[in-house]
Image (cartoon, helix red, strand yellow):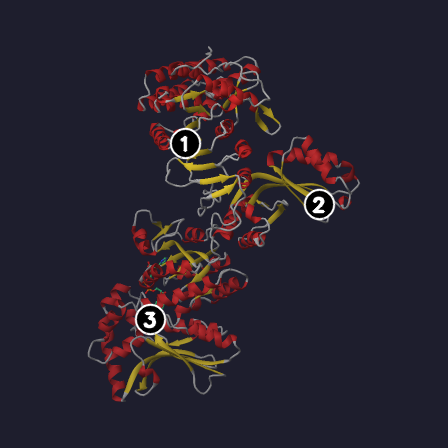
Amino acid sequence: MSSATFSNEAANAAAAAACTVAEAPAGPSPGARPAEQEAHRTGFPIHVHKFGGSSLADAGRFRQVRALLEADHGGRRVVVVSAMQGTTDALLALAANAVHGRDWAPAWAALRSRHLAAADALSTGAVVHDALLEGFDTLREQLAGLSGGEAERIEGLAAAIQGHGELWSSLLLQALLGGTAAGWERLDAREVLVVHPGEMGVAVDREQSRARLQAWLGRHPGRDLVITGFIARDAAGAPTTLGRNGSDYSAAIFAELFDADALTIWTDVDGVLSADPRLVPDAVCLKSISYAEACELAYFGAKVLHPQTLAPVQARGIPVRIRNTLRPQAPGTLIHPGRGDAEANGHGPVKGLSLVDGLAVLELAGNGLVGVPGIAERLFAALHRSGVSVTMISQGSSEHSICCVVRADQAGRGEAAIRAEFSEAIAEGQAQGVQVTGDICVLAAVGDGMVGHHGVAARLFGGLAQARVNIRAIAQGASERNLSVAVARADATRALRAAHAAFWLSPQTVSVGLVGPGNVGRTLLQQLAEAVPGLRARGIDLRLRALANSRRMVLDHAAIAPAEALDRLGADAATALDLEAFAAHVRAGHLPHAMIVDCSASEAVAARYPEWLAAGIHVVTPNKHAGSGEWDRYAAIVAAQRSGGGRFLYEATVGAGLPVILTLRNLLDTGDVLHAIDGMLSGTLAWLFNSYDGSRPFSALVREARALGYTEPDPRDDLSGLDVARKLVILAREAGRGLSLADVEVESLVPAELQQVGLEEFLGRLEELDAPMRARLEAAHARGCRLRHLARLDDGGRASVGVVALPAEHACCHTRLTDNLVQFRSARYADNPLVVQGPGAGPEVTAAGVFADVLAIAQALR
Ligand SMILES: NC(=O)C1=CN([C@@H]2O[C@H](COP(=O)(O)OP(=O)(O)OC[C@H]3O[C@@H](n4cnc5c(N)ncnc54)[C@H](O)[C@@H]3O)[C@@H](O)[C@H]2O)C=CC1
Ligand SMILES: N[C@@H](CC=O)C(=O)O
């Protein structure tokens, strides 16, 4: 069946659905550019819109498209459509099944039902319904014709079959917009668009197409048009397509043929992003990019636009905007004819990063290549002859080797071609042969603003180095618009994320995981909630992305608001605690740095520090287990830091927020020699003995200290002297002494019978402490003394912890509340000790001490 003209909606619909190529009357002869070629120039601005399959997925999306088009009512609207989402794939599958004699009828029926249902839902009327039925009948006949027959005929049928989707979607949309009665014409692109296979893909016969379009427009008076994307005719008039994603290309061709003022490509993303958001969660939408930048990004893997798409609009300087059908309020990305502005997107010279997968490196090396003219010419000619496309080229100035990156599936062919070309040189030992490295990806940084901008390569390579990515080959053309590196496939995502972080994020961006939101951890969350916005303004971007208590954890790719973190941990989305998964999540490759803040008192968590530090994760903690626990683990922590791993800061383990460890470090780092450390190292015991005057039972005070958050999770750790012994060991080790807990003489206030019972039972039997403590207090008072808990590390390495009765005038008897008092006696501070004094326990001061360590690490990051 064929139709000569499309004078009304019914004829238009029926002819299109029949999937034949309509014969339009011959237009003006090619070559000239006659005046009537501008006949489409109505005086109104011409705006070409292209809607992809995702924008036309169902009836609801069609209505959205109508709303978008109704909002653009100032000029002539030329709307190029793809098939409804999934239709082209379904048609290809139908054709494949038919060719292979498999049953295609159920899938055909499903596709038919889907389109008829959309037509019903859109109330497009009987004419469209009948046209769809006819179109599907035609499709059925074509599918039947695919089984058996000559290859050429099958090929022709297959091309016709692929294009049905656009015919159907254009039919639905034109009807939804009101049809010809409302001024909406419908053009089957196969009537006007003439293409032929070109050296670089499908090429358009512009003169013929333009002439056909003028003729068609002369016969169709409506102002606005719906045009089928993807499909065209060949020079002989047979149906063909523009290749996958050809609808964008169709839209650009029609924008050129109409000499449009603008082309908008509506899709399901906000625009061109700085990187693939599936790989880089922090990818940002670019406000504007130049044609050249878009081409580079498209070529190197950005999925939004095919580079070919831009050629027709580029020829006329027509601006293109990529917009999201689902979020039309978003401005999208403008692709413009000018030069890319380095600051247009507020992120410096690099506009985008792209990644091409499935590549291999081919390398020809040999002493005989040095200084010999024509090697490159021969190598690339050999690849050309064997049909291998080259993605990237790199040669060092020594000329000892030359390498290029090609598609992995062409690498074998390329290798054989080069071997054959250089067989003599290889046989004579002048060339070492051809080396093929598979599983390669190419990462490219793209931006017009890179031209003449120093430091771009340094940032890229610095980011990759930090992520421990090895670079296999590098290429930058003299245009300086594209800097490409070949990396192993296994490193590719990490490389992309690291590069993105290097260009788009502050170097002080830290992925933070918090373990243990108890007294201290919860308070730290409050402090973070207040401080994070101000810190971000200073470039310190602390992103809390993981939180765990002893049972559950919540992980989020974005930042968790600290104020909401506890609720998130209590919510259904939280999962069972898995410290391995927790650490892997915190060490997200798309953020430059990772840190775990351990506010638990857990030995099991501390046991992870060496592996976390070795993996480059910084660790900050008030948990004393690692600093005072088994020596081998402590040594592993020190070694991991020294060998370039993460940093380990634990100031809050001694004296809470007081600068005790820092003071000791400063003494030692500046060459002082430590003699002794003594004083009060327990906030709980300081508070207990400051408060205990006999008026209230000791047990009641212990309960109060616990409620105030001064004690360890198990107060026996304080009362037994173990907590202070741990602090003494931490300080001794910091001073280079190999002390362990077993070396500390400890006096315990916990009766032997309460040492092994459970925590709840211990708390229930606290009163058993009262009588012995009262006896001790009275004995001290009788001597005019006060009870104080003291720790001492002397010059000979002896360490001891216990309660002593001190004369009232002793400095330790002039402390208040939870005050710690730490005295350092050293070569410089021999006569009079250096004293650090102040509150040594409590969630506020401890969390602040932890926070200060977090900031000390973040501030030092580059
Ligand atoms: N409270 C204070 O004044 C000071 C406390 N510290 C230290 O701070 C740390 C926290 O103390 P608090 O907040 O008072 O304790 P807490 O008992 O109130 O909180 C501990 C938190 O750690 C979590 N946790 C326990 N085991 C865990 C595991 N295996 N995995 C994951 N999470 C686990 C718990 O669920 C809880 O959220 C302790 O190491 C303590 O020694 C240090 C200086 C002062
Ligand atoms: N429980 C400890 C808390 C700080 O380490 C103390 O009281 O000092």
853, above or below 440, in the image: below
The residue labelled by disc 3 is: 841
Q: Secondary structure at mark 3?
A: loop
Disc sitting over residue 401 in the figure: 2
Q: Quadrant of residue 150?
A: top right
Disc sitting over residue 54 in the figure: 1
Q: Secondary structure at mark 1?
A: helix
In-front residue for pair 187/760: 187
| Circle nearer the N terminus (1, 2) | 1
Q: Is mark 3 within 8 Å of ligand 1?
A: yes
- Separation (CA) of disc 1 from disc 2: 47 Å
Residue 519 makes an appearance in the image = yes
In-front residue for pair 74/88: 74
Expressed as whole percent of the image width and height from the top left, the position of residue 247 reads: 48, 28
The residue at 77%/41% (across/down) is 373
Comparing labels 2 and 3, the label whose residue is closer to the camera: 2
